[in-house]
Amino acid sequence: MQNIKIKDITNSHRAISAVDGDLVFNQVVASFENKEPVTLDFEGIDLTITAFLNSSIGKLYSKFSTETIRELLDIKNLSQDELPLLKLVIERAKERFGKNYPTDLDRIDVVNED
């Protein structure tokens, strides 16, 4: 199991950067691809915003199923105040990445033809 201490990534008591979120995302993806469980440890983090959560956790739904994420991802020490943000990020990610958009969107010339 890989244990990722968010404070070690952010070098701060805040998790606010999408760039830092991408660093976490890349580490999680590498572990998930090997079927290795990951713990994200938010110990020492006083402030977390959606930019970080979207980049680190929300994007996982673009690559992995909800079942895989539930099975392999554990989140520890996230402040109770931040839990609603995490739930919002997960709901939006499921909605966004769960839709089946046409593969030829770049070729569509007219959006509204009425």
Image: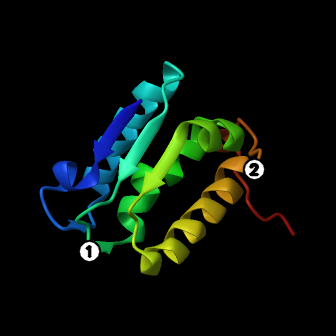
Element marked by disc 1: loop
Residue at left offset 36%, top offset 61% = 52
Among all residues in the image, which is located at the extreme left? 11
Label whose residue precedes the other's in the sequence (1 or 2): 1
Q: Are marks 1 and 2 in contact (CB under 8 Å)?
A: no
Amino acid beneath label 2: Lys
Viewport quadrant of the N terminus:
top left
Residue at left offset 48%, top offset 25% = 36
Element marked by disc 2: loop
Across and down, in percent, residue 70 comes to: 63, 44
Across and down, in percent, residue 100 comes to: 77, 44
Residue on which the image places disc 2? 99
Given residues 44 and 87, the one toward you in this image is 44
Image: 110 above or below 103: below
Q: CA distance from mark 1 to mark 2?
A: 34 Å
Q: Quadrant of residue 50?
A: bottom left
Task: Judge left or right: residue 46 versus residue 99.
Answer: left
Given residues 28 and 101, the one toward you in this image is 28
Residue at left offset 26%, top offset 67% = 45
Image: 20 above or below 1: below
Given residues 1 and 92, the one toward you in this image is 1
Task: Judge left or right: residue 3 versus residue 101.
Answer: left
Across and down, in percent, residue 53 comes to: 42, 60
Closer to viewer: mark 1 or mark 2? 1
Q: Residues within 10 Å of mark 2 (few under 14, many from 20)?
A: few
Across and down, in percent, residue 38 comes to: 44, 37
Task: Judge left or right: residue 64 versus residue 37.
Answer: right
Amino acid beneath label 1: Asp
Residue at left offset 83%, top offset 63% = 113
Q: Quadrant of residue 17?
A: bottom left
Q: Residues within 10 Å of mark 1 (few under 14, many from 20)?
A: some
Residue on which the image places disc 1? 46
